[in-house]
Amino acid sequence: MSVSGEKFGWLMRNVTKLKPLLNEIGFAAANELKQNFVVGGRPQKWEPSGRVKAFGGETLRDKGMLMNSMTHRIDSATSVLAGPGSSVSYKAAMLYYGGTIRPKHGKYLTFRVPARLVTHSKSGKELKNARKEYTFVRVRQVTIPPRDYLFLPPLFFDKVDRMIQEFIDNANGAQ
């Protein structure tokens, strides 16, 4: 992006009026982050979790809690932050950087997992509403691979450049 000295000067004098621009950039960034979940990882596909390999589903998408928490906030008069909301921040770092989870007490971690889909009663009668039966799995540890869900593609930054240029052009035209 090329901004003339005059336009840059105007921008610096009017920095307190940037909130609408920062909001637009933050909204676009949060949408790009959500897209990482929709496509299963960018720039590379995420490695499927052990649970997905064993029982099906979609890595980081089954409940959609992390994906749907992607949001933005204006951090100061000149910056905006985009990423997971506070409702899932306790999980976000482990899922981003990866790591190994071990039990704090005892020898095993215990998880409830789907065992099978029940479609018929014990007498053999077909059920109107199938239901899942669950079982428990015990493991000594779980290793989570890193997944870059905060990736923003290069085209996003081109879009931001255009937003800034349009903001400056519109503001100068309004004077």
Image (tube, rainbow, N blue to C red):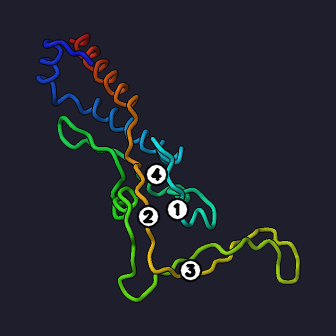
The crowding category of the residue bearing disc 4, from other C-alpha atoms within 10 Å (few below 14, some 14 to 19, many at least 20), is many
The residue under label 2 is: 144
Q: Which residue matches tag 1?
A: 49
Seen from the viewer's position, the closer of residues 153 and 26 is 153
Q: In the image shown, does 135 or 76 lie closer to the viewer?
A: 135
| Disc 2 secondary structure class | strand
In the image, residue 39 sits, relative to residue 95, either above or below, namely above
Furthest residue toward bottom:
106
* Real-space Cα separation, disc 1 to disc 4, in angstroms: 16 Å
Tell me the amino acid under the disc marked 1. Ser
Residue 62 tag number: none
Mark 2 or mark 4, whichever is nearer to me:
2
Q: CA distance from mark 1 to mark 3?
A: 15 Å
Question: Decide: marks 2, 4 in contact (CB < 8 A)?
Answer: no
Q: Residues within 10 Å of mark 2 (few under 14, many from 20)?
A: some
Question: What residue is drawn where x is 11% and y is 23%?
Answer: 13
Q: Which residue in the protein does label 3 denote?
A: 137
Q: Looking at the figure, which quarter contains the N terminus?
A: top left
What residue type is disc 4 on? Answer: Met
Are the two marked residues, 1 and 4, in contact with CB atoms closer than 8 angstroms?
no
Q: Nearer the viewer, residue 147 or 9?
A: 147
Q: CA distance from mark 2 to mark 4?
A: 17 Å
Using residue 9 as the reference point, say whether residue 84 is left or right of it: right
Q: Which mark is residue 67?
A: 4
Residue 122 x %, y %: 83, 83
The CA distance from mark 2 to mark 1 is: 7 Å
Q: Earlier in the sequence, mark 2 or mark 3?
A: 3
Residue most extreme to the right: 124
